[in-house]
Amino acid sequence: MNAETAEREMMKLKNQTVDLGLTGYDELFMSGQERADSRKPKVEEIPLAELTPFKKHPFKVKNDAEMADLMKSIADAGVLSPALARPKEGGGYELISGHRRLAACKTLGMDTMPVIVRRLTDEEAIITMVDSNLQREHILPSEKAFAYKMKMEALKSQGKRTDLTSYQVGTKFDAASEIGKGGNDSRIQVFRYIRLTNLIPEILQMVDDGRIALTPAVELSYLQPSEQEALFSIMDCDEVTPSLSQAQRLRRMSENQTLTDTAAMQLMSEVKGNQVEYVKVPADSLRSYFRPDTSMKQMTETLVKAMEFYNKHLERQRRERDAR
């Protein structure tokens, strides 16, 4: 090796850097704990005006008892758990988790809220948004439906093998099973929920209200939108809902292109085997006596108990009159 070549090799060695896994010169003199602390997510106080909801956020922000409790907690102790957001092109931040906290802070007249800011891809943001919201105590079927679909499509965009149309065949990476873990649902149940996204809004609302069960609703999701609209008109007018058997027959008629308005009316007019009489009372006339988040089932159960109490009261009055 001549002198010129040796000098070039020495210059290469001099310019080489050794990767110690450190992100800055200052970390070289930090302790292990200080280094770990420096890499923890930083919480920032972000102005509420700079936070925008996640695009097509499937989870509803409701003014219910849970929101009232959250507002009281924030008013008393502040926001204890920071929200999560990502920077937007052109400025501001897109909220990934913390939509209810944002609504509560706005209602309370606050200017800022604590937020952890992370740079995430669209797919990473969707998966994080869905996973964080599935931990909520009360989730509507429609919320699960669109959340599961969004996460499935995000996994597909990441290159994961998924199938949005079939739940009979497994894959090497079983996306449906993975998604179901967050909501305590089986892979088949995940696909059932995703099917609900094919329902028109009016029928999907009936599912959220508990008027149509999940399994019949899945069968109805195979009807064409125009067929669903005609069916909803019948259900709304006659105040009836299909049983599972009726929903299955409606689907077969749709697939055979024999589902006319007349056929649907005849089918829905059939008396179900377990059909019982109902006293119909407008829900609006009862809402003032219950908490905003009380379901129809809970209101019905309370009304039955109230009538039992009232009958006991009448019986007690009758016995007192007879004893005189």
Image (spheres, grey):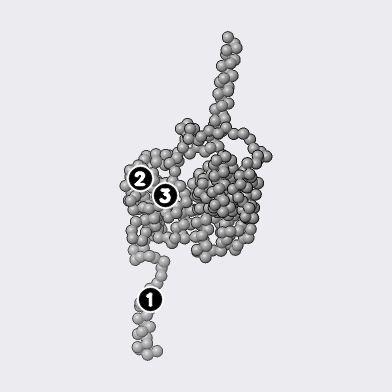
Q: Residue furthest front?
A: 262
Left or right, residue 156 beside residue 263: left
Task: State the mark number for residue 16.
Answer: 1
- In the image, residue 112 lies at what x, y percent? 33, 48
Q: Residue furthest right?
A: 273
Mark closer to the observer (2, 3): 2
Mark 2 crowd level (few <14, some 14–19, many ≥20, 10 Å Cα): some
Q: Nearer the viewer, residue 208 or 222?
A: 222
- Residue that numbered label 3 is attached to: 98
SS type, badge 3: loop
The Cα–Cα distance between marks 3 and 1, rounded to whole angstroms, is 45 Å
Label 1 sits on what residue type? Gln
Label 2 sits on what residue type? Lys
Left or right, residue 288 beside residue 171: left
Task: State the mark number for residue 106.
Answer: 2
The Cα–Cα distance between marks 2 and 3, rounded to whole angstroms, is 12 Å
- In the image, residue 161 lies at what x, y percent? 56, 63
SS type, badge 1: loop
**Residue at image point 50% right, 37% down:** 294
